[in-house]
Image (cartoon, rainbow, N blue to C red):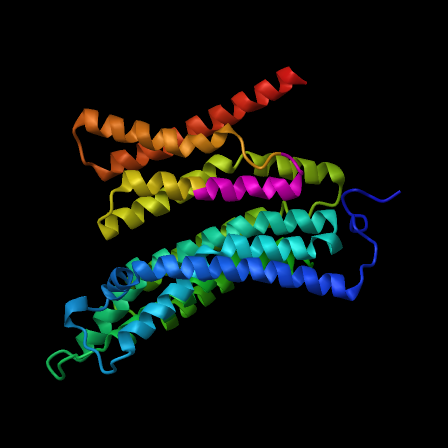
Amino acid sequence: MQNKEFGDPEDDEERPLMEHILELRDRMLVTLVAIIILSVIAFVFSFEAIRWVVNPVMDPSELVVYDPLETILIQFNFSFIFAVGAGLPIIIYEAFKFMEPGLFENEKRFFALITPASLLLFFMGVTVAYFLVVPVVADLVFYMGEGVVEPAISIELAYNFVMSIIATFGFLFQLPIVLLLAIKTDLISPTFLRDKRIFIYIGFFVLASIFSPDPTLVSQAIVTVVFIILYEASLAVGWYITPRTERDIKTFLRKFERTGGLFGVGGALLAFYLAVNLGLPWWKLVPLVATVFYIGHRLSFRVILNNKALNIGILGPIIATIATETIIRTLETTNEAISIILIVILILGITYGLESLQKHIQRKRT
């Protein structure tokens, strides 16, 4: 009898090569169509978005163009990058469904667990790069040439400068995923990471100095602290992702199931920060991003436990945002700290409350 947790893949029958090729074609076609549609949508607002992208470097109105096709090519580039980023859930889902017949149950679980975490970390890296690193590096570069040369930067150079830093930090923030994969495959152990943490912290600071050359050391310190937090979080999770018994797995899954509200809070905080810095109404962006993060968490359970992907907890971020906005208007205050505290408390409370209510209803039915 096959072990349900660690046994052979559920679909162990060999299929003809042509059948695999046809399935791959269909899934690639779905992905391609999604990227094309998202690219067209992104192109509509691409020019305004590009202005936001280059704003930390220089006022967009002061940038110059050296090639007649420069602006349109940047718009195409941005539209494609946006489409790939926004379409990542579709790309990952189609890739997973293609590989699913050959995966073990524990491999499916691990894939489902790291996917939403990877997306969250990437967006965190992008946020830190855009709002912290890019402005500091740009100010430093201009300061070094101040009084000597008059900057005349093309929109293409400014765009490529910002996007390269954003992409670098987006991928650097995948550090926890890399560490967890290394732990999962027994390349390194949590004990080794714990014992060598001081040397690794020093390495973080060196990397931060390379990617964020700030003479005041402020940005290096901030980036290093962020990396240390990510490292310690990876180390903590590392003790739980190497279960050796079925009981350990069930215990870990129960703990992971309770983190849906935390994913919603993470999305809400990220959205609030973006909204404030971009001058957007946070009460519109927060419920959207928080709900997307919550859905990403719940979709993992479609793979892990084959149960319903969503539940009424999905209403938590929406209800919490409406309640927060109502309270803020009633208090007649614009204090951002109060808004953030209310959002965190209400999303956690309402989401967990709705999830508990659904579990209670399900128990009654059974």
Residue 226 percent location from the top left of the image: 40, 55
Q: Is residue 304 magenta?
A: yes
> Considering only vertical position in the picture, is 345 above or below 204?
above
- Residue that extends furthest to the top in the rendered view of this protein: 364
- Residue that extends furthest to the left in the rendered view of this protein: 147
At 41% from the left and 65% from the top, the residue drawn is 81
Bounds of the magenta segment: 292-307
Question: 40 or 119: which is nearer to us?
Answer: 40
Question: Split into 4 quadrants, where in the image is the N terminus?
Answer: top right
Question: 48 or 111: which is nearer to us?
Answer: 48
At 23% from the left and 68% from the top, the residue drawn is 57
> Considering only vertical position in the picture, is 98 above or below 269?
below
- Residue that extends furthest to the right in the rendered view of this protein: 1
> Considering only vertical position in the picture, is 135 above or below 305?
below
At 37% from the left and 71% from the top, the residue drawn is 164
At 28% from the left and 77% from the top, the residue drawn is 70
Q: How many marks?
A: 0
**Left or right, residue 2 beside residue 210:** right
**Secondary structure character of the magenta stretch overall:** helix
Residue 88 percent location from the top left of the image: 50, 56
Quarter holding residue 160: bottom left
Q: Is residue 194 visible?
A: no
Residue 344 percent location from the top left of the image: 37, 34
Q: Is residue 220 visible?
A: yes
Question: Split into 4 quadrants, where in the image is the C terminus?
Answer: top right
Q: Is residue 283 magenta?
A: no
**Left or right, residue 254 beside residue 77:** right
Residue 197 percent location from the top left of the image: 52, 58
